[in-house]
Amino acid sequence: MSALKNIIYNCRKATFLIEKKQLSPLTFQEKVELRIHLTGCSFCRLFQKQSISINLMVHELFHTAKPTERGLDETYKKELQERIENELNKN
């Protein structure tokens, strides 16, 4: 019974397994433990839905976005440089 309680009340392990499941297959034991935990834990079920959504969005962002040049505009760079110099000159 103690092992079952460890599965049911261990959200830390469940969240670990949720993340692991998205990267690699779980063992049979891990699948069973996760399923048992998710049956009784609405917080971890919500975490799983959110985690899957976030991972899909990040995957889409990095794999479908066209490469663009990123950088600061020149005006912002000059303003930032002036602020840095002013702060350094205060001492």
Image: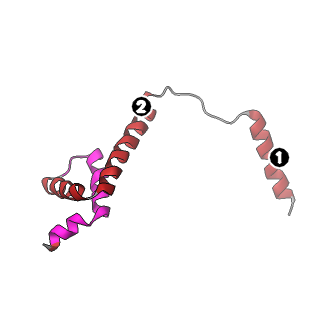
Amino acid marked by disc 1:
Glu
Q: Secondary structure at mark 1?
A: helix
Find residue 8 and report its horizontal and vertical position in percent. 22, 64
The N terminus lies in quadrant: bottom left
Q: What is the residue that sits farthest to the top in this orientation?
A: 66
- By secondary structure, the bulk of the magenta-drawn segment is best described as helix
Q: Which residue is mark 1?
A: 82
The C terminus lies in quadrant: bottom right
Q: Is residue 68 above or below residue 10?
A: above
Q: Is residue 47 above or below residue 3?
A: above
Is 10 inside the magenta-drawn segment? yes
Residue at 43%, 28% (x, y): give it: 64
Find residue 86 and report its horizontal and vertical position in percent. 85, 53
Q: Which residue is mark 2?
A: 63
Q: Secondary structure at mark 2?
A: helix
Q: Which residues are magenta?
A: 3-26
Q: Is residue 9 above or below residue 44?
A: below
Residue at 82%, 46% (x, y): give it: 82
Find residue 45 and report its horizontal and vertical position in percent. 29, 51
Residue at 33%, 45% (x, y): give it: 49
The answer to which image quadrant residue 32 occupies is bottom left
Of the numbered discs 1 and 2, the one sitting upstream in the chain is 2
